[in-house]
Image (cartoon, rainbow, N blue to C red):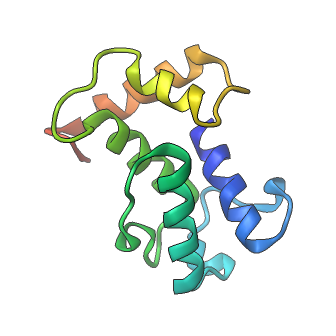
Amino acid sequence: MVARLVASEVARIFRVATEEIEVARPLDELGMDSMMSLDLSMAIEQRFGVELPIVAISAGVSVNDIATRLIAGLRAGKGDEKPAGEVELHLLQHGAGAFDPGELIALTDAVKAHSIDGALL
C-alpha cells in the first residue's frame, strides 16, 4: 500500500520498474546515494505533504521503514492526533487511490498500535 507508493518513487529515481524494488531491503544496498536520498525526500514531501528528513533515509533504511515513518508522520501531524480517517483520506488524495481504503485504515491503525507518544517501537 504505502510501501508501494514509496517504492514507485524509488523506482522512478533508479529508473527501473516498481516491481524490481525489494521493499524490505535497505536502500543503500540497492545503490541509493545521498543525492538520490534528497530526491526521494523531496518527492515524498511533494506527494504526501510530509517532511521526511534525509537522516530518515539513511543507511540501513528500507522502503518499508520509510512507509512506516511516513504514516507515523501523517498521523502525528504537528504533534496533534489527526481525526480518524484523515490520514487515510490524505493518502487517497495524494496517490493511494488504487488501494482499498480499508487496507489503509488497517495499516495506519497497526502503526499507531506499535507507537508510544508518536515514537515508533
Q: Measured from the top left, where is residue 35 in percent x and y? A: 56, 84
Residue 20: x %, y % from top left: 82, 61
Which sits in the foreground, 69 or 86? 86
Residue at 36 percent across and 38 percent down: it is 74
Q: Nearer the viewer, residue 44 or 109?
A: 44
Check the image and name the residue furthest to the right: 17
Q: Quadrant of residue 57?
A: bottom left
- Left or right: where 17 falls relative to 108: right
Residue for point 43% across, 76% down = 58
Q: Is residue 21 above or below residue 36?
A: above
The tally of labels here is: 0
Residue 47, image x and y in percent? 56, 48
**Placement of 110 over or under 78, stated as above or below:** above
Residue, x 51% and y 85% (percent of image)?
34
Viewer-side residue, 95 vs 114: 95
Instruction: Give the vertical position of 117 relative to 69 (above or below).
Output: above
Quadrant of the rendered structure where residue 104 is? Answer: top right
- 84 on left or right of 41: left
Task: Tell me what residue is drawn at x 63 percent, y 35 percent.
Answer: 1
Question: Which x, y percent locates residue 88?
Answer: 48, 23
